[in-house]
Image (cartoon, grey):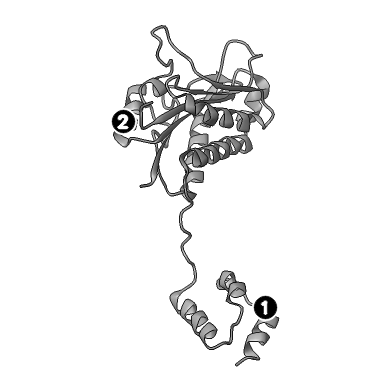
Amino acid sequence: MSKKILIDPGHGGTDPGRIGWGIKEKDPNLAVGLALAKKLLIYDAEVKLTRQDDDSISLDQRSGLAKVFGPDLCISCHHNGVSSQTATGVEVFYSHSRPAAQALAARISAGIAKAGLCNRGAKTWLNASGTDYHHMIRKVESAATTALIVEAGFLSNPADAELIRTEAYQDLEAQVMADAAAEYLGLELKAKASTVPAWQEAGFASLIQRGIITTPEYWQGKLDQPITVGELMGILAKL
């Protein structure tokens, strides 16, 4: 059975999230979420997003989608912001009830921070009642689901914001999360569909059977590629 991954681009619609240096958090959140979903297409996994456009979706609606979908992993894409311009860096939150997720959170934080940001590391955050502070961890985390909040830089920091607004940094965020998720869940690559027509495959097999092609391992990966004049002469010489 393939694994399920829910991607949750934070905020959206009438909720812009943090705003800093001309950037509304909801926008890079969505860009990273969409890029992450695309990068996960190569794996044998079922991937869904809580939003794919600039939609207003409440926290209860998001966690409700998660309960219906039943993901093995839920990643909420966010970017931070505080009143001070000096706060900087990447941090990833995981549930205090799942210490095994610390390594996953730490890998993502360190990987994104390689873009030149401070690595604030993997963290848990509890509220006054002793439960996880973040709704999308508190309401989604379960025996079957690992939930993370990725805060990939501070929009309130001018240097962080300049990175966050770039497509290259957003792509890095997505790639780091995709690679980490694939390893954590043990995802397998989808079988690559052959682009070689059946009649060509049959002709190739016939040439091997007749002894005209004696090095099939050389030709197998080249059936959909152009042949050189030298290769053609070599085959014709055996006919």
The residue depicted at 62 percent of the width and 33 percent of the height is 111
- Quarter residue 155 falls in: top right
Q: Find the residue positioned furthest to the bottom.
A: 239
| Residue 142 visible to an observer of this rendering | yes
- In this rendering, the answer to whether 183 lies above or below 161 is below
**Seen in the image, is 70 located left or right of residue 155?**
left
Q: Residue 1 at what x, y percent from top left?
A: 35, 47
For the residue marked with disc 2, what is the amino acid?
Lys
In-front residue for pair 132/154? 132
- In this rendering, the answer to whether 212 lies above or below 158 is below
Mark 2 or 1: in front is 2
For the residue marked with disc 1, what is the amino acid?
Thr
- Quarter residue 11 falls in: top left
| Residue 35 visible to an observer of this rendering | no
Quadrant that contains the C terminus: bottom right
Q: Residue 173 at what x, y percent from top left?
A: 57, 34
The residue depicted at 63 percent of the width and 38 percent of the height is 168
- In this rendering, the answer to whether 10 lies above or below 130 is below
Q: Find the residue positioned furthest to the left.
A: 68
Q: Residue 119 at what x, y percent from top left?
A: 64, 24
- In this rendering, the answer to whether 169 lies above or below 149 is below
* Tag 2 residue: 67
- Disc 2 or 1, which lies upstream in sequence? 2
C-alpha separation, residue under disc 2 versus residue under disc 1: 56 Å
Label 2 environment density (alpha carbons within 10 Å; few <14, some 14–19, many ≥20): some
In-front residue for pair 21/226? 226
In-front residue for pair 225/184? 184
**Marks 2,1: beta carbons within 8 A:** no
The numbered disc on residue 228 is: 1
